[in-house]
Amino acid sequence: MTLKLPKAAVSMQEGKIVEWFVPNGGQVVVGQKLYALETEKTTMEVDSPFAGTVTYLGEVGTTYAVGHPIAEINT
């Protein structure tokens, strides 16, 4: 399953990955905190919608457009 940068607010166009909470290649469960996302107005923690092995496609400190693929979770 591909995770894309979510649209956290109506006016949001892009966001920056601040931190990954699960190591690349690590296991994640549904609802576990996966990464921190910084927008124009706030920083929030995003939970994993899937369980499986995480492979990063996005890098910490990089800004991505809403909808850009940022990770794969192989179930």
Image (spheres, helix red, strand yellow):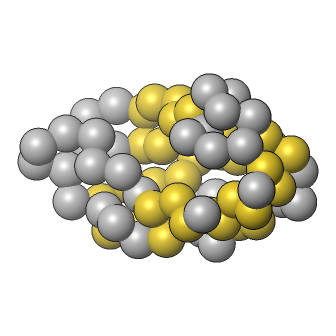
Q: Quadrant of residue 61?
A: bottom right
Seen at 19% across and 50% down, the residue is 12
The one of 30 and 47 positioned closer to us in this rendering: 30
Expressed as whole percent of the image width and height from the top left, the position of residue 52 reads 78, 50
Q: Would residue 59 be seen by someone viewing this image from the given angle?
A: no
Q: Is the residue 70 above or below the residue 27 in the image? A: below
> In screen coordinates, is 5 left or right of 28?
left
Expressed as whole percent of the image width and height from the top left, the position of residue 72 reads 66, 66
Expressed as whole percent of the image width and height from the top left, the position of residue 1 reads 60, 63
Total labels drawn = 0
From the image, which quarter does the C terminus lie in? bottom right
Seen at 41% across and 71% down, the residue is 68
The one of 7 and 64 positioned closer to us in this rendering: 7
Q: Quadrant of residue 13?
A: bottom left
Seen at 89% across and 50% down, the residue is 26
The one of 56 and 62 positioned closer to us in this rendering: 56
> In screen coordinates, is 73 left or right of 52?
left
Q: Quadrant of residue 19?
A: top right
> In screen coordinates, is 30 left or right of 65?
right
> In screen coordinates, is 13 left or right of 26?
left
Q: Is the residue 18 above or below the residue 55 in the image? A: above
Q: For the view shown, which residue lies furthest in the front direction? A: 75
Q: Would residue 28 be seen by someone viewing this image from the given angle?
A: yes
